[in-house]
Image (tube, rainbow, N blue to C red):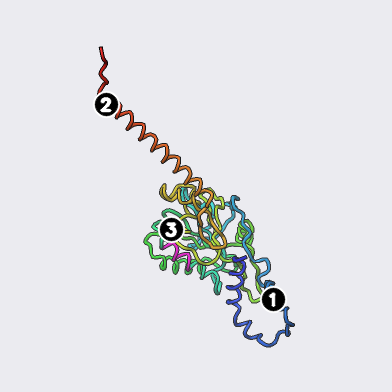
Amino acid sequence: MKIRLAILALAAASMLPAVAMGQGSGPVMAPGESAALSNELPKELEGVEFVEHLGETVPLDLRFTDDDGTSVTLADLLKPGRPLLIHLGYFKCPMMCSLVLNEAVRGLQGIEWTVGSQFEMVAVSINPSEDAELAHAKKAGYVAEYGRKGSEKGWHFLTGPVASTHGLAEAVGFRFRLLDNGDYSHPGGLIVVSPKGVITRYLHGVRFPSDTFRLALVEGSEGTIGSSMDRVMLWCFQYDASTNSYVPFVFRLVKLGGALTVVAIVAAVGVALLRERRARRLQPPTAVAC
């Protein structure tokens, strides 16, 4: 519900000029009607959402055009040991896409792993009229903002025919609407895909804390990046879509606490037994009367 409300707020903000133009022209509502109507989504947002397909494999054979003009498939972009972050939207998007990508850059700057080294970043346009020239310009801006040398090889801004772009959107549950003015109404977020092409996580909304990115990439990499402590943290935390972050998984923490308690008890008993055995060896023999 919180995700849908966030999408509603962003979409409403993007339509502020249109709303302002229509002020005072709508019907007068009777008392009590406003509460009922406030729970209804505008027509522009009906069906606009992520339908999660966790555990499913993205279509790796769909063909796109990369920002340098070359023809690629998602299979070409998957690298051994590197998870893939996918953003769906369009490059002339007036609001949502810029918010998502700008915040993604900020979040990724907060972790030591680099695009193109430990993971890949892909932005796919659902607008079939957009081309590689526009994609190249968009990529240049975000690579410059990211500011890490050599990362350009890990950023991919893709365009392509409807069969490919909309086919990918359908496969990952990215549901959008084409509006009368030619813009698209769509949800905000990122999709994490494993090196084998399996969807491992959806990161909803437009804000992505660095810690969330870190755990999502560890999860998506299937353990190929990150430290042992990262994997322990991932085991103790689970993703909460309502807060767009990983939160403590209480049951696992209790189990971990119980296991550590057992280990501590066993260790304490072992130390006590060793001390007792050592004390017996050092004790002088008892004299025997003749």
Find the magenta span and give its range: 102-109
Q: Nearer the viewer, mark 3 or mark 2?
A: 2
Chief SS of the magenta region: helix
* Res 60 visible: yes
Identity, as a three-letter code, of the amino acid under mark 1: Ala
* Res 158 visible: no
Identity, as a three-letter code, of the amino acid under mark 3: Val
**Chain-order first, disc 3 or disc 1:** 1
Mark 3–mark 2 Cα distance, whole angstroms, equals: 65 Å
Q: Nearer the viewer, mark 1 or mark 2?
A: 2
Identity, as a three-letter code, of the amino acid under mark 2: Gln
- Toward the top, the furthest residue is 290
Specify the label residue 259 is tagged with. Answer: none
Q: Which residue is mark 3?
A: 115
Q: Which residue is mark 1?
A: 35
Q: Horizontal placement of 80 versus 57: left or right?
A: left
- Toward the front, the furthest residue is 289
Q: SS at mark 2? A: loop
Mark 1–mark 2 Cα distance, whole angstroms, equals: 85 Å
Mark 3–mark 1 Cα distance, whole angstroms, equals: 46 Å
Q: Which residue is mark 2?
A: 283
